[in-house]
Image: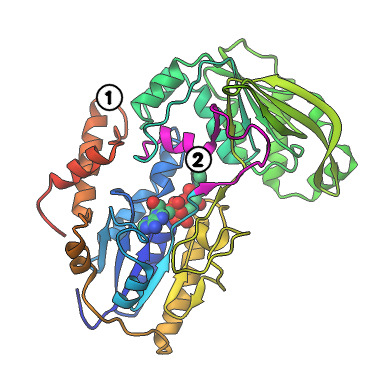
Amino acid sequence: MNDSALHVAVVGSGPAGFYAAAALLGSDLDIEVDLIERLPTPWGLVRLGVAPDHPNIKAVSRAFEKTAANPGFRFFGNVEVGRDVTHEELSRLYDAVLYSVGAQTDRALGIPGEELPGSWAATEFVAWYNGHPDFQHLAFDLSGERAVVIGNGNVALDVARMLALTPAELAVTDTTDAAIEAIAGAGIREILVVGRRGPVQAAWTPVEVGELGELEGADVVVDPADLELGAASEAELAAAPPTVRRNIEHLRDYAAWKPAGKPRTIRLLFLSSPVAILGDERVEGVELVRNELVDGRAVATDERQTVDAGIVFRSVGYRGVALTGLPFDERAGTIPNTGGRVEPGLYCAGWIKRGPSGVIGTNKKDATETVQLLLDDARAGLLRPRSGDSLEELLADRGVDAVLYVGWEAIDASERAAGEPHGRPRVKLATWEELLAAARATSKAK
Ligand code: FAD
């Protein structure tokens, strides 16, 4: 490392971490960045959240690879802040620390039965089919005829679509083999997506809604009555951005379609909330209440229905987790900050800064805004100079076996090589043992 440079630790290597690193390394100050990541693999939700049948979106990782090629960049995977190194230590070892740790858990519905076996957070299912090494032990029983997905965002649609993909559609993706096998062999006939408000208020985007109509193995069903919007929603639609109008156009097309008799059906149900997940030993159904919209809010009526369900996925939002030694806003699930500055020397970006919303690109503007404040503080002499040994020494003393960027490149090469003969982008290594073994197969250190 260059002693005269400013040393910045960025914690979390998802989009926000990489965009922050790029902005720091591209500034006119002499800066070196250590990107610290708890997993042996970088890219955060680009690798482990974005749906495997969206390879073009995952290709944003090429921009991250360019950042990693910068001589001032180092990657320390398999290093968890809070477990292997504390925030206090990082703030001593670096001139500034920037947290981009994302939102690591899910929001609860707060209804009876939520904890029954067969009731899952979408976060768990998404992490499982994407090969997150902490989630491979989970066993999803997809034998029931109906899966219920609660939520009206893009993640809910990802889950619904993944459940509906045919073996041929899955075969060309980097979905784990265990997930491909389970989805292909599932007994599911209907995937019911439940939104508490109406179609105008849904948070999904037109590409995802449009894709539902292109599935080989699933019809999409919308009740035309749900598209009779009422005066308030019509007015909201008239004033809404074009994306909302495109969503409604897609839904109108679906409402007019006659099902083609495909093996599975995705049914979109609006103005309904789960009040209980039912079952004795495990999920057997969901009790739903019909809502009406009052000033844009969903208000329960006394109209209830029960639907049978073999499995439930709760997709009502991700949530940030507090890190020891750092301030935390429990309500918002974020680190309290102003434009990404917590205090001079301590910053945040991405979902832990603004909450779990926005697409990958949103994090670029967001991280750049944070880095601008960090640079302002550096120029104003507000950063407390680092002191003490280096991170490598501290990790070596503790016996922490960090995965450096060459280690990740070895994982990457082995996964791509395994995928190539089958026309797949990669076959993911999905256990800690496999990932660490592949990373260790390299002896060179960057
Ligand atoms: P993350 O991507 O979550 O990265 C955080 C990183 O921090 C992770 O790698 C994590 O392991 C690491 N970390 C956490 N705690 C620690 C710690 N204590 N020490 C060290 N490291 C730590 N956007 C799109 O544009 N297109 C899509 O198709 C799309 N699909 C999505 C699908 C799903 C299921 C989800 C959840 C999101 C999707 N998004 C999509 C949104 C996009 O993924 C997010 O905007 C983005 O990933 C947020 O970036 P981030 O860097 O804040 O968090």
Q: Judge from the rendering whether residue 443 lies leftward or rightward of residue 268; answer left or right.
A: left
Q: Is residue 117 magenta?
A: yes
Q: Are marks 2 and 1 in contact (CB under 8 Å)?
A: no
In the picture shown, does residue 361 fall above or below 115? Answer: below
Q: Which residue is mark 1?
A: 422
Q: Secondary structure at mark 2?
A: helix
The span picked out in magenta is 105-132
**Image-quadrant location for residue 376:** bottom left
**Which comes sooner in the sequence, label 2 or label 1?**
2
| Residue depicted at 47% across the width and 50% down the height | 104
Instruction: Give how far across and how far down residue 88 sits, in percent.
Output: 36, 73
Quarter location, residue 99: bottom left
Image coords of residue 96 (percent x, y): 37, 76
The amino acid sitting under disc 2 is Thr
Residue at image x 50%, y 74%? 341
Q: In this picture, is 242 found above or below 213? A: below
Identify residue for label 2: 123
Label 2 within 8 A of ligand 1 by Cβ: yes
Horizontally, residue 56 falls left or right of residue 222, namely: left
Amino acid at the residue labelled 1: His
**Given the current orientation, which residue lies at the most extreme left position?**
443
Residue 26 visible? The answer is: no
